[in-house]
Amino acid sequence: MAENETKTPSVTRQSLEKLFEPAVRAIEELGTLAQLGFSAFVWQFRRPYRFGVLVQQLEFVGVQSIFLVCLVGLFTGMVFAVQTAYGFRRFGAENLVGGVVALSLSREMAPVLTAIMVAARAGSGMAAQLGNMRATEQIDALETMAVSPVQYLIVPRLIAGTLMVPVLALLFFGVGLGGAYLVGVVMLSLDQGVFMDRVTALLDKRDLVQGLVKAVIFGYAVTLISCRHGYYAKGGAEGVGLATTRAVVWSVVGVFFLDYIITSFMTDMG
Amino acid sequence: MRLAAQRAEVSDWVGYEVGYGVGYEVGTMSESDADGPQIIIEDLVKRFGERTVLDHINIKIDRGETLVVIGGSGAGKSTLVRHLIALERPTSGRILVDGVDMAALGDFELSRVRRRFGMVFQKYALFDSMTVYDNVAFPLREQTKMSEREIKDRVMVKLDELGVAHAAARMPAEISGGMAKRVGIARALVLEPEILIYDEPTSGLDPVTSRTVDELIEEMRERFGVTSVVITHDMASAFDIADRVAMLVRGKIAVEGPPENVMASDHEDVQRFVHSSAIDPARIAQRSARKSPAQVRALRKERLAKQGAPKV
């Protein structure tokens, strides 16, 4: 009967478990993400290819985010132009406003803020939808009908996220630059020719490529993190709510973490 | 041979071979195999953390047999049937379907084996982004080569049989729970699979619809030789449709056998469960001692007068 006795872990063991719990959870989380990502990678090559579902997701992630991305892009460009003009005026370099805004938009602001917008709008929606499907056994129902939920639910979302975030980031860049032009040329009366000349002089093809590479990776990461939290949601309404919150929080954290890694890597390369 | 002919008919209709699991050469299954157990649950144990939900379960289910699993809430019935279709993985033990260990299969192979199953979920599990019609058409679109016209005919027949054809264009959120249950049943039956799992198919349904569902379960067995595993609390239904009944008590099989044997069992939990469900003379006699509404109102007035009405 000794094996049935309740064993109380020692104080040292309990303390060690508590100390390492966050690290263990982080490793588990990364493992779950890697597993889901790998499974989705394998299933995307298997028939049937679900173009209808993919188009729906492209519309959900991309088309439905256009207004939000434009709005945030416009104000980001405008605010950045005002701040840059204010700072650069101190040493008579207002003419650089266009170039500096274009550079920061292309390399950082456009991919990062677009990814955050997509996480907040589409990522939360994905987590809530998948979480609700898990809670109401719709995912189990798919499995019993011999339809892989990973192939049917995750693959189209991952492809849509990976494709649409770079497109939206380009849009963000264009609208943001338009906002900066509006502030710089129309409101602050900077010379239009100089403004555009500084943009073309400072902005390099590599800056745009770096921004696009980031956007592709962020798009994939945000969608994978959002899908993971929804797909493995536990419990009822509370679980779905928790999954949605976690999806957004960890997507944003993931974007900034990846941003540092990619920036370090690409800057060293460049 | 009749079974083989029916399977051939279904295979032709769905566009792939049914009746033979992964790892089997199509057409090599002998008649003796066909008469043996189709599903074997071997020493199945399932634990969630420290809690043991299924405790060394052993059941064999023959081809074409209807096994009804009864038991109180939390006895492990749903967990047991979820193992049959590998929605849960066992802590230990095996589930063999035609000799194939379900837990040992990878995603892709499992997907192929699951084509032989249909499942009616306790809470319907309808896709809320699709209409009732699309929900029932979904398995046909996914698994057959049928044209949209053939799919429409088939879906409408099934919806009509279950009395929900008028709701075909509605979304699941726009129909009642009873209707949603019937749509869930129609979706599971539409492919006429080899093995059907029903998780409380008659709960929440009116008695007339419940009997219709029982008849459908019987019809699936009679016409297509379907193997059925049914979870229910409805004892009338259990004894109508069961070839065998298994009662789960605290994760263990307490009694297993033909319905009449289970009825006659002197196991305490079985007796309590069976007799709580039946309308026996003792319960009818108890009704005569029941207070009338007028008596109940008078008692309430008396109690409120004593303790004073609560302030609102």
Image (spheres, rainbow, N blue to C red):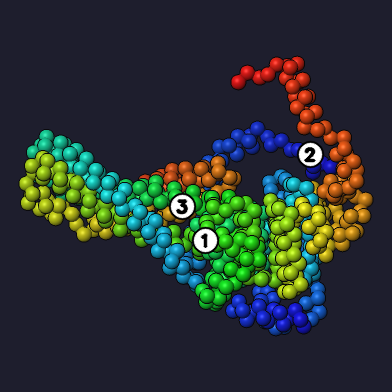
| Residue sitting at x 70%, y 68% | B195
Give the number of the mark in front: 3 or 1: 1
Instruction: For mark 3, name the chain.
Output: A
Q: Is residue A72 above or below residue A269?
A: above
Q: Nearer the viewer, residue A21 or A212?
A: A212
Earlier-in-chain disc, 2 versus 3? 2
Q: Position of residue A44 (x, y in %)?
A: 47, 67
Q: Is residue B242 visible?
A: yes
Residue marked by disc 1 = B169
Q: Which residue is disc 2 drawn over?
A: A5
Q: Is residue A159 above or below residue A47?
A: above
User: Mark on residue A242?
Assistant: none
Q: Residue at x 60, y 39 (%)?
A: A17
Mark 1–mark 2 Cα distance, whole angstroms, equals 59 Å
Which residue type carries mark 3?
Answer: Met
Residue B89, visible in the rendered structure: no
Label 3 residue SS: helix
Q: Nearer the viewer, mark 1 or mark 2?
A: 1
Q: Position of residue B133 (x, y in %)?
A: 54, 64
Q: Do tags 3 and 1 sit on the same chain?
A: no
- In the displayed image of the protein, which residue is found farthest to the front? B294
Q: Amino acid at mark 2?
A: Glu
Asked which secondary structure carries label 2, the reply is loop
> In what element is the residue under mark 1?
loop
Which circle, 2 or 3, is nearer the viewer? Answer: 3
Determine whether A235 is above or below A14 in the image. below
Q: Residues within 10 Å of mark 3 (few under 14, many from 20)?
A: many
Task: Identify residue for label 3.
Answer: A126
